[in-house]
Amino acid sequence: MMTQMSRRDLIKRTGMAAAGIAALGLLNACGGTRATTSTQTHTVAIGTASQASLPTPGASGLLGVLDVSGTEIPLTATTTTHAILPGKNATLMVYTTAVGGWSYINPIFRVQTGQSFAATLANNLDERTNIHWHGLQVEGRMDGHPSLSVAPGASTRYAFTVRNRGGMYWYHPHADGTTAKQAYSGLASLFLVEDDDERALAQALDLRFGETDIPLVLQDKQFDASGKLVYAPQPMDRQMGWYGDVPLVNLTPSPTFMAKTRLYRFRLLNGANARIFRLAFLQRGATAPFTLIGTDGGLLARPAPVRELFLAPGERADVLLDLRAGRIGDTITLQSLAFDPMDNEMGMGGMGMGRMHHMDGTQMAGTTLPNGTPFPLLTITVTAQVAYDRQIPDRLSMIAPIDVAGANSRPFTLTQAMPSMQWLINGTAYRIDESSVKVQRASREIWVLQNATMSMPHPMHLHGFLFQVLERRGSPQHVAALGTDSAGRVPTDVGWKDTVLVWPGETVRLAIDFSHPFTGEQTYLLHCHNLEHEEGGMMLNYTVG
Ligand code: C2O
Ligand code: CU
Ligand code: CU
């Protein structure tokens, strides 16, 4: 087995010598050379028996970490070929860049709070595109609004000061009508922000990004027999969302990760178009305890012990897994557990549309892995014993509750139009040049998201500002069971958020402080991060001025 350092050096050298495509291939090849002691067999047929190592961020190549320090980054949105399924090339859309002689594919930007960031996006695709910096508090014209996209062959520039707390944010396209397809095709990566709390935690727990602090980008995709990506949503898929039947972690099916007997930090992003994950770590068939330390907008005030969490498209969860009691050869599986997706249970003549959708794969371009089906994502194998005596601090950060005394409440209903089946916010579909919601700058408001009973779970995402979840009411039993306070909130609600999952029948109240330093009227979005729902019109513009 190659050591982390030699693998990194190899990638670095190749990245310097060759084009990004070669680096991408090499990363996979390196993965293949890693020995695995896992004897676990997956019970779900996922179209491949890959034993590839989990790609972890190195100094370049795929998901290479690019420290941003005042330099202008020349990003290109382009296509490349990459074998996601072993030996079968798929065409992906990716972001590439070369900085200081190193090549990157879907680079992970790393920035300190307060630093400035600047990138030029060259569009080498044959359709319009742009970049949205998901979770970052930037001014409207830098936010990747669908009305601000760039034509094939043209370029555009993004520049902003990073004002966010430390945390794992991400970036992906947001052009009119193509967000779902382009993000699915591979255009998505991470944006790490570091601050004092982050540095203190890394120091306290001896965490190193890419080694003991590992981002896990969770997705699911469909492939044809030749290994090419399939994205062909039919009207029913536009209603339900596009699901894959191959779960991927860091663009790799069923990878393995070699671990030592110590604490690991995993930073999870749900980068899927529509799939919700109910995440747990399974050991000998039982769920293992783990610790939630952060959400979309960075660290929680205090660590929270959990055994499972729901992660919907767009959301992040920052967790610690304690492997100190592990023995060499032990395996722990990151699993998505079974759950009822509650897809419009009473609709379609009393039959769950999700189930009907998936019953006959020959009639509809459905997946064999419906939302709510259990499957493994990642196998963690303990391969080395080390001494490790660090303790999780009981204070991680400070989170001051937004003062909503006397704040205005604004209702948002999530419903479905009949017979068009289009998903709507406040009874209307998205209109790119209209803004129905006008917010007073520096005001504090309570936004009330009310999902219909006959509906689907909708991960609602806000641009421009992060929010705090005040209350969750009318939750289905499998969500209520995770509630930890009298407001019905679950552990992942208790921190800064930019995306919140609203289940059928639920009403979720959010506190938002619309203070920011940008002058003039700013236009942002509220939308469902089920990207087929977003594309289908479940989105609205709001302005702050
Ligand atoms: Cu990650 Cu408007 O989306
Ligand atoms: Cu966003
Ligand atoms: Cu939705």
Image (spheres, rainbow, N blue to C red):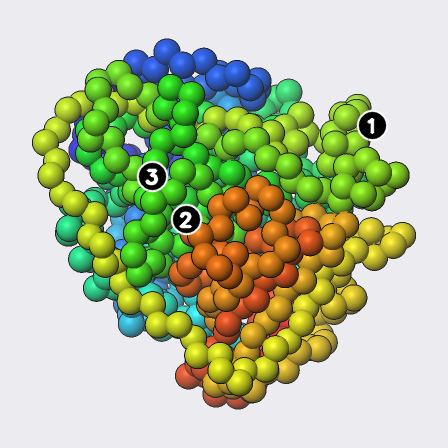
- The first of marks 2 and 3 along the sequence is 3
Q: Is residue 361 visible?
A: yes
Amino acid at dot 2? Ala
Q: Is residue 35 visible?
A: no
Q: Secondary structure at mark 2?
A: strand
- The first of marks 2 and 1 along the sequence is 2
Q: Residue at 83% x, 44% y: name it.
A: 347
- In three-dimensional space, the C-alpha distance between marks 2 and 3, rounded to whole angstroms, equals 12 Å
**Mark 2 burial class by Cα count in 10 Å: few <14, some 14-19, many 20+:** many
- 126 to 57, vertically: above or below: below
**Residue that badge 1 annotates:** 363
- In three-dimensional space, the C-alpha distance between marks 3 and 1, rounded to whole angstroms, equals 42 Å
- 14 to 423, vertically: above or below: above
Q: Residue at 63% x, 64% y: name it.
A: 449
Q: Secondary structure at mark 1?
A: loop
Amino acid at dot 1? Gln
Q: Which mark is residue 310?
A: none
- 24 to 440, vertically: above or below: above
**Residue that badge 3 annotates:** 290
Give the percent coordinates (x, y) of residue 17. 28, 38
Q: Secondary structure at mark 3?
A: strand
**Residue that badge 2 annotates:** 317
Disc 1 within 8 angstroms of ligand 3 (CB): no
Amino acid at dot 3? Phe
Q: Residue at 45% x, 13% y: name it.
A: 41
* 497 or 10, nearer to the observer: 497
